[in-house]
Each structure stands twice: as C-alpha cells, then as structure tokens.
Amino acid sequence: MSAVTMERRRARAGSRNLLFWTGVGFIALLVVFAIVGPNMRHAYDAQDFTPQLGPNAVNWFGTDHLGRDLFARIAYGARVSLIIGFLVQVIAVTFGMFIGIISVFAPKWISIPVQRLTDGMFAFPDLLLAIMLVGIFVGKGGGLVPMVIALAVGAWPATARLVKTQVATLKDREYVVAANAMGAKTLYIVMKHILPHLWGVILAVMMVDVAATILAESTLSFLGIGVRPPMPSWGGMIMLGDSYKESNINMLIWPCLFLSMTIFALNFVGDGLRAMTDPKGNQSR
Amino acid sequence: MRLIFGVVSLLFISLVTFLADEIAPGDLATVRAGEKATLAQVERLREELGLNRPWPVRYVEYITKAVKLDFGTSAIGTQKPIKETLSKAIPMTAKIAFLSVLIAAFFGILLGTTAAVYENRFADRAVLSLSTLGVTIPNYVLLPIMVWIFALNLNYLPTSWAPDGQRVASDIFYLILPVIALSLRPMATLTRLTRASMVDTLRQEYVSLAVAKGVPPFRLLTKHAFRNAILPVLTVIGTSFGYLLTGSFVIERAYQIPGVGFEAIFAITQGDTPMILASTLVTGAMFILVNLLVDLVLPIIDPRIRESQV
C-alpha cells in the first residue's frame, strides 16, 4: 500500500471519528435537553403566552397556535422520541437475538419454520404493518403500549437475521467446536462463547435502528395515530406545523430540524461504532 | 414458488391483523350498535353478524370472501361497500407510486452511474452527500417544507390536491410536489446502489479488455457495463416499492389525495376495522405483486438466471 493511500485512509478515518463524536455529543445534549427541557423555563403544556410568536428572549423557539412554548414542547418531543426509540429497540433486539440463536441451534423442525417466518416478516414493509396494527387499536382506545408493540413487531426480524448470520459463523470457530467437544452444554456455549462476540455489532446496528424507530414513531404521530395530543411529539408537531405553516413557519421548522438532526446523529454514531467493532468494515459507505 | 411464498406471507400478515382485531377490546357489533345500545342489543347484532362464532371460522370466511374481492361493508356512516371505496382509491395510489418509481429509477440510475464514472472526484462526492441527505430526511418533513416554499411563497404550484371540477391548473401541476417528495428517498437509495454496483462492474476484467480494444466510453457504459450493474438495482426497485406504499400514506394524508393510504388513515381514525383489514390486504397484495413482477423481469435481462431456473 502506497503512502498516499495510507494517508487518505487515515484522513477518512479521522473525519469518521469527528462525525462519530459529533453524533455522540449531539445525542448526549439531546438526552439532557429531554430531561430538563420540558419544564426548564416554561411548562410544556401551559398555554400562557401570545399565540404564534416568533423566537424571542422569553420563548426561545417561539410559541404555537395555542400559546404554548415551542422550546419546552420540542424538549418533551425529544423525551418521547428517545424513550420510544430505545424501548422498542431493546424489546426488538432481545426478541430478535432469541430468534436468531434459535434458528441456528434449535432442531430443524423448529428452526426452518422460524427462519421462513423471519424472512417473510423481513420482506414485508414494517411500517405498513405497524400502521395497520396500531390502526386497529386506535379506534378502540389506543395508547402508547400498542404502538410500542407494533413498532417492535416490525423491528425484530432485522435483528434476528443479523444475529443468525453472526451466530452461524461463530458456531464454526475452533474454540466453540472445542467447547462442544469437551461436552459443554449449548446454553453454556451461547452465553460464554457466542454472546460476548455479538454485542459490538448489535450495538452498532441498534443505533441505526433506533433512528429508524424514531422515524417510524414520528410517521405514526404525523398520521395522527401514534403519540396523540395533548402529549407533544415531533411527528405530531410536524402535523400541526403543516396545517399552520401559512401563518407560523416556526411550528414546522423546529420539529423538522430536531428530528432530522437526531436521525443524522444516530446514524453517525452507528457508522462509527461499526467501524470500531468490525476491523474489516472500512469501506466507505 | 415465489408466488406461493408471496401468498403465504400475505396470509400471515392478514392473520396477524385479524388477530390483533380479536385481541383489541370491542368489535364490529359495539361499533355499529352505537354508544347508547344496551348489552342485549349488542348481543343480538353480534348474532346477526355471525360474530359469536369462533375466530378461525370467521377468519376463513373472511379470506374466502376477500379472494372474490368482497371485503364487506364499512363499519361506519352509510356502510358503503368497501370494494367501491377501494376501486376509486387504488388507481390514485397506483398512479402516484408508479410515477415515483419511474422518476426514482431514472434519476437514481443516472446519478449513480455518473458518480461511479467520476469515482472519488467532486461529482461523486456531491452525489453521495446529497443521497445521504435523501436517505435520512423523511417525506413528511420534505413535503410540508416544499409546499411552503413552492406553493405558499413562490406560488408556482398548488398547496394541496383538488377534485376534478375545482382545479385551477392542469393535472400535472397537482402531481409534481407529492411525486417528488415520494420519490426522493428511493432515488437516493437507488443512486447509492447503482454507484456501488457500477464501481464494482467497472473494475471487472472484461471492462478493462473492452477499454483496451478501444471501445468508446459511452458505448462501454451502455453496452458493456450497464446490463451487469443494473441487476441488483432492479431487485431493490421491488423492495423499495414497499417504502413507496408506506410513503404514499403520508403523502396522501399531507396533500389530501384520496388514495388507499388516505382512506386507510381515515378508516383508522374512525375505528372502521373492516376497511383497515381490507386496505392491509390490498397494499400487501400490491407490494407482493410488484416484487413478483421484478422476479419475472430479471431473467429477461440476465441469461444466467434464466438458465438456473430451467
């Protein structure tokens, strides 16, 4: 390898590091914002101000059509997005890992149907399924629980497939074969020799998937069937902003900006983690 | 084989939504009887509608009817047959989704090829950065902002859909914003994919040979590289159609276009379960149909696939 390509590769790794730390920094700030923001200066649900104000010294992001402080509402939206994003992924990853491991280690009559099911679910557009599942519950009360479940139902097949391919390669490693030969139980092998190698990859993919879940959640909220008023969410705020864009563009711009930045940040973090955990994965994507 | 697989997954999806409806509190009888109905009235209605039979029986009945395109009637309002609503909505959604696929594929392949030819140079970098933006920014952010810029401020395009009688501009103007908003993300995906595939293809030995033979660059691209590079792209066009269907829910809702998505969301907010189930089946069927179509087209382009199927 010539010095020039080495140089270039290092430069690219450097810029990836910068993006990674920018992403980490943004998410860290967002978490703080989500914890203290909703009640820091004004309560997120108080209708105390003149409606439709632009950004000013009192209401940093302006106010909405009911005179609520947009800064506090954006902060509450961050809380909702982060909690739902991570909660759904934790459920999906746990279930997906379980299924992924089963489809490698279980006897054929279990593993083959499970794999087919995973592939079928994976091929079907998950958001479409989530919309329909949530939709059925919306008319009958709704709430956050059906949405979290619907999003997790759409999200687990991706993890299951990833885990399956990873586990399938790990299974043939010499130390696993050796452990097997020494009479170790399958459960012991999975816990001691397989799982520890998976965390890095799963964490990297999870960051990107959290972004996807946040997008899905705000799609549902935008359609009016996810998080519903009076609870503020970015998707719901974009929907409101859309209908008031003629008189007050602030209501549209802020949630759009925060949503997009969060998605970018999570993707940067995911890409960075993948580069760190997978030494071969240094292709520019 | 693929057809059977498609039908099975469609059945599975319909079963999941059907069961979700079973688990959810309340049923068609409670919706139709209204809030003031007594328990006895609801029970009688349940008997009339056949709702007190076990769910597997009703599921099988539902599917056998749905195969004949009979989805029953809407649970609310005038109880219009669902078939009627859907037959008006499907062409609308199909038109927008189809136009978006076309635009996404054309520009995606064009931009991706350009980026691959100028690999690691300015044009490539620019296309890659733009496509990253395109992949991440959701359409419900794009469309309102585009409407704000082009319809409200610049006054070039209509702010939302209008029925046939009430149009002030020709039809095409009503399609521009929703189709662009819908096509940008698949366009970005296809751009990246075409670029990656084309970069790979251009490194193949037969391409170097063609260059050595003195094949002119344009002919090299169109005749030699394109056919090989395009295969993975075609498969993804099929899968990205799923995104387009979901996207059309958002776009139709935001731009007030009376398509399947618009009707489905309306049904959801009204608690019209038969309509929700029917639109699940229809959108699912559309998705599977398009993917089958892609599977049929692939062997025409690639003789290797044709041979492996015989």
Image (spheres, rainbow, N blue to C red):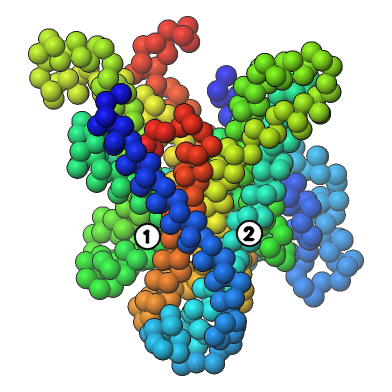
Which corner quadrant of the image does residue B216 belong to? top left
Q: In the image, is residue B8 above or below residue A244?
A: above
Q: In the image, is residue A221 above or below residue A8?
A: below
Secondary structure of the residue carrying tag 1 is helix
**In terms of depth relative to the viewer, which is nearer, A154 or A275?**
A275
Q: Residue at x 70, y 34 (%)?
A: A195
Q: Which residue is mark 1?
A: B142
Label 1 neighbour load within 10 Å: few <14, some 14-19, many 20+: many
Instruction: Inspect the image, locate mark 2, and give the three-letter code of the amino acid beneath it.
Output: Ile
Q: Residue at x 67, y 49 (%)?
A: A90
Is B22 situated left or right of A82 in this image?
right
**In terms of depth relative to the viewer, which is nearer, A95 or B145?**
A95
Which corner quadrant of the image does residue A137 belong to? bottom right
Is A263 situated left or right of A7 in this image?
right
Instruction: Inspect the image, locate mark 1, and give the three-letter code of the amino acid beneath it.
Output: Leu
Q: Residue at x 39, y 87 (%)?
A: A56
Quarter in which the C terminus of chain A is drawn: top left
> In the image as oriented, which residue stretches furthest toward the right?
B40
Q: Which residue is mark 2?
A: A84
Figure disc tally: 2
Q: Chain of mark 1?
A: B
Label 2 neighbour load within 10 Å: few <14, some 14-19, many 20+: many
Q: Position of residue B171 (x, y in %)?
A: 27, 57
